[in-house]
Image: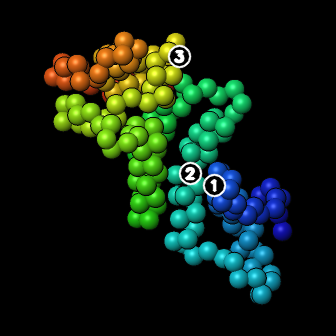
Amino acid sequence: MDLNIPTRTLLQDMPCRWNASYNMIKRIAEQQEALAQYAIQNKKFDFTFDANESILLHELTKLLQPLEELTRLFCCETSSISVKYPYAKLVIQKISLLQFENSDVNKIRDQIISGLGTKFFVYKEDTFVKINKLVYNRFSDHQLAMFFDPRFKDKMAEFPEFLRRRVFLHFAGMPETTIDEDQILPISPISKNLKDC
């Protein structure tokens, strides 16, 4: 029986490989109809999905796909540290907009956003700076590298003036407490996207 599905082997998750879970789930979702047909023909094979499990597979694939792209970009030999902050920010924005039927997938999405935020935007609790009632980390290598990359500069920064002042103070050897927090305004979210870079 021809199902118009590519003939492929199923993949197994490997915890030491970043994208193994995504690749495994994507392959199972892709081959779901073939697995169902095989289960009908072979009664001993008990590997079918109900409607909720099928939705879960497709939602997880949709959620993990931007992360797969991000990890491939980060692991590329030619990838520089300067792209990591802006691309992580774009992925956070992209997956923040995703809504899923399955509440567990929404929880996973929130955990991914939190994890990326911790990695790229908050480093240590004792290095927080409060600006306009929001808390930000004092400085990170990702932000510094992004600032010196002519493609990005401060275009992806939520507070561009704050980032420029932080870079100046960082190289001047001055404490960041000299920044007047009341003068710093966030950039309009409309102008923050990758094509502006």
> What residue did someone put label 3 on?
149
Q: Is residue 41 at all visible to an observer of this figure?
A: yes
> What residue did someone put label 2 on?
64
Residue occupying the point 39% across, 29% down:
139
- The answer to the question of whether label 2 and label 1 lie on touching residues, with beta carbons closer than 8 A, is yes
- Tell me if mark 1 has few (under 14), some (14-19) or many (20+) residues whose alpha carbon lies within 10 angstroms of its own: many
Near-viewer residue (39 or 81)? 81
Disc 3 secondary structure class: loop
Q: Position of residue 147 (x, y in %)?
A: 46, 18
Q: Position of residue 61 (x, y in %)?
A: 58, 55
Near-viewer residue (27 or 32)? 27
- Tell me if mark 2 has few (under 14), some (14-19) or many (20+) residues whose alpha carbon lies within 10 angstroms of its own: many
Disc 1 or 3, which lies upstream in sequence? Answer: 1
Residue occupying the point 42% across, 44% down:
118
Amino acid type at mark 1: Tyr
Q: CA distance from mark 2 to mark 1?
A: 6 Å
